[in-house]
Amino acid sequence: MLELKEVMDNKILADKRFGNTGLSLISVKSEEEIADVLRSANEKGKTVSIVSGGTKRGYGGLKEEYDVVLSLAEYRGIVEHTVGDMTVTVRPGTTIAELQNFLRKHDQMVSLDPSWPEQATIGGVIAANESGPKRLKYGSARDLVIGLRVVYPDGSVIRTGGKVVKNVAGYDMNKLFIGAMGTLGAISEITLKLRPVPKDESLVLLSVKEEHVDELKTFAIKVQDSMVEPVTLELVNPTLSKQLWDREAYTLLMGFEDVPNAVQYQEEWVRAQKPKEAVMDVLPANEAMDFWNRFANIAPNSLTDNSENGEVKANLKIGSKNMQVMDVLKEADRFQRQYGVTLAAHGGLGHGLTNAYLTGSEDQIKAVVRELRDFVESKQGYAVLKHLPFYLREELNVWGKGQSYHFLFEGIKRKVDPNNSLNHQRFVGGI
Amino acid sequence: MLFAKKKKKIDGDKHYVSLANIVGETAILYKKEDLVSYDCDGFTIHKSMPKAVVFPKSTEEVAAAVKYCAENKIPFLARGAGTGLSGGAIPLNGEVIISLAKMKQLLSVDFENRQAVVQPGFVNLKLTNSIANKGYYYAPDPSSQYVCTIGGNVAENAGGAHCLKYGVTTNHILGLEVVLSNGEIIEISENGIPDAPGYDLLGLLTGSEGTLGIVTKITVRILKNPEGKQTVLAYFDKAEDGSHAVSDIISAGIVPAALEMMDKTAIEGVEAGTYPVGHPRDIEALLLIEVDGVAAGIDEQIEEILKVCKQRNVREVKVAESEEERGKWWANRKTGFGAMGAISPDYLVQDGVIPRSRLPKVLQNISEISKESGLRIANIFHAGDGNLHPLILFDSRIPGETEKAVKAGTACLKACADVGGSITGEHGVGIEKIEEMRFIFTDEELEAQTKIREVFNPENLLNKGKLFPTPSRCMDVKKVIKEAAAN
């Protein structure tokens, strides 16, 4: 094994609240080093946890401590940006902000808007399949990743996909590693397809009082049936709307990104068609960007969660049918009142994902998580805990009830990581 | 062709009787004369007979037939419309073919949640036709969309002319019901809800060319028709100018819905075909460019495209003046492969992908391959996403020429692989490109994929011999192709 510097006195190792820590931390600066660490651990029967920006240590994982924490945070930077091909190849430790700022100089972007762009790294975002409200128009990681290099637990390096935007040679192996929570390999390089930065953008906010919230659903259906092409149709509950915008009301966020004429035309369409009860505000490009930056920092994460005195923070990601998001938000508000927690939430009426950010006592959090999960599971949806202190994770079952075909997940894990050396128990069903 | 309804005895193999018990006596073919039309798919260079063809009418019948095959160690594979161009549905091992042609219902449409549920035998274009009255459509549009099935599209991860902006099949699949290779039925993301916890099996199964399971129900995303659509046709004296215009349009920040290119030989073909539009014969390249979206934003983008074309020395550029004209241009393009039949007795379609910026170099390489082989090569392709379709024109009646065409096709794929591209963008590997997989993957990377196959298809009874080279297998297939070529 390489003479790698093992750090014993590190913030990541010292902070045990979210688990996924280790006896030592090795920070690598090359793919060879990743391979050496994984190979050596695998051969010696040691367990490895992977970390990069450190925002997701509260996301899954039933082990407080692994033998080694492998940090990819220093393996960063752009490998290749082919402007004419609109593709970029990047190392996993690169933060989202660093990547976007680099691309912006060429009027290009990765059309992904995950939380905490300043801290979260592209490797972590891909491994956890993170996305934001704009996935309505631009899709999620699975639509943008065209190639990966992955270091397998035995130290071998596998390329999946390629550097072309269309490719059906062999299995679409990229998909296996996106959202796999690092249980199948350490992603050492990522190739993404890019989009041009839109020539103009704006954000339309439609706010209604609670009793008129159904009007927003009717309106959202009308929007979908119309020629309007919003990049977001994100509904925000009053608690979150107050935090973001100082307006305690259900607020529908409709982003428009297009050439200026088209942006303006769509704003006017909304003005003419909106429910009469709704108050409409329009944020021009600069303000819209500021708003989305604020929005990207509202979720609790393991770097910023400083809860004490028995207070607990949690992030529940809920999947439902698109329009059921409205019902999920309403139920969430009911539980907020019933149990006295603080619950800020938003969900995409066009993509079916809701995030609820909860703050309260341990008992309150447990009760609301169970209630909300029961509700969405009764509608064939799911609820996953994206952020939760370690001590509650087993009891609350981070990943929910699981799938009838879980044996296939186990089979895949067994083929790739037979010794369970990588991020063991981090993922669904204790994989 | 099918059996008469009345009671009759099924001769021969006991397996015929057992399978007939599962799907019904009128839903099985097993006589040689009935099986002949199932000896190949759209890849006609290799032919091989199945053991039988069954036509289940339900998921349960598919599962029962699969279970029977698995228990009796009979190789089997699924087939849709049989339009695949890489031989994915060709029985190499005397398979029982499970045809999904009778499972062709549109099960439900949910406009509010923008999804539709179809059976695998449902024809691609029929979905768009069924929802067009509400202004919706299904985005993936392979050229064969009027006949190919959505089940087949899932197996091949089919593309089409409009995937530059809207993505390929995998970007539109929300849920799958799958019969595994032992006959077990699973439902992945039954309600089309995204990000189901667990590994992304939807993504893995889509494009697995029928080697990981048989899809029996599909939930797809449906989209609203864009308000505005404008199509531009541009003629270039020099192919290089056309290639540069492609890059310039993309660099200008425009995301066209489609950006297609044809070269001189291709133009000769389409003009001799069923849908000529009067393209000049002496140009080296034409571009067909489509922009769609909010109507208020279209003109600005069209202006920009016209400007780029002029900067790149376009001879003539025009915007479609009516839906009829637009339709004509597209019919001319979409029937392009078949039109080659008008200028050549036979043609072989290839399907490579390159980084867009390498277009001029690769076109040059293909032209050299053409010269070396002495065969004409026409290029019709999705230039926007770098997906090339060299069409190698040959005459199978001339001894050795088929072999030469196959060789030239391989050389074209090598040229794509050499610039960091791929050997297939939408047609799949099937049996056609098994050996070419080595152009882009190491043995280790191929093994990583076959290990995944072992999870789903441990006995390798399901569509055996496809996709991956093994030392013996690929030599066999190549030998067969070469023999076929020699005959």
Image (tube, grey):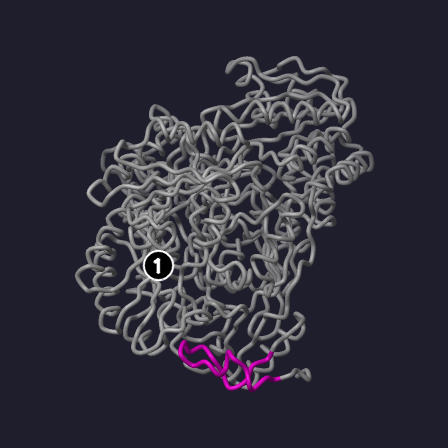
- B190 or B414: nearer the eye? B190
In x, y percent, where is residue A158?
61, 64
Give the number of callouts. Answer: 1
Residue A247 visible in this rendered orientation of the protein = yes
- A384 or B35: nearer the eye? A384
Q: From the viewer's perspective, tell me whether residue A163 is left or right of residue A233.
A: right
Q: Amino acid at mark 1?
A: Lys
Q: From the viewer's perspective, tell me whether residue B81 is left or right of residue B134.
A: right
The image shows residue A345, relative to residue B114, as above or below, that is: below
The stretch in magenta equals A6-26
- Please identify the quadrant where the C terminus of chain A is shown: bottom left
- A423 or B226: nearer the eye? B226
Residue shown at 67% from the left, 71% from the top: A30
Residue shown at 62% from the left, 18% from the top: B273
Kindly identify which residue carries mark 1. A317
Residue B118 visible in this rendered orientation of the protein = no
In x, y percent, where is residue A191?
61, 54
Residue B13 is inside the magenta segment: no
The image shows residue B253, relative to residue A363, as above or below, that is: above
Residue A10 is inside the magenta segment: yes
Residue closest to the far left: A338
Using a 10 Å C-alpha cutoff, classify the residue at mark 1 as few (fewer than 14 neighbours), some (14 to 19) or many (20 or more). many
Q: Secondary structure at mark 1?
A: strand
In x, y percent, where is residue A287?
49, 44
Residue closest to the far front: A246
- Please identify the quadrant where the N terminus of chain A is shown: bottom right
Chain of the residue that carries numbered disc 1 in the rendered image: A
Q: Quadrant of residue A160?
A: bottom right
In x, y percent, where is residue B117?
33, 40
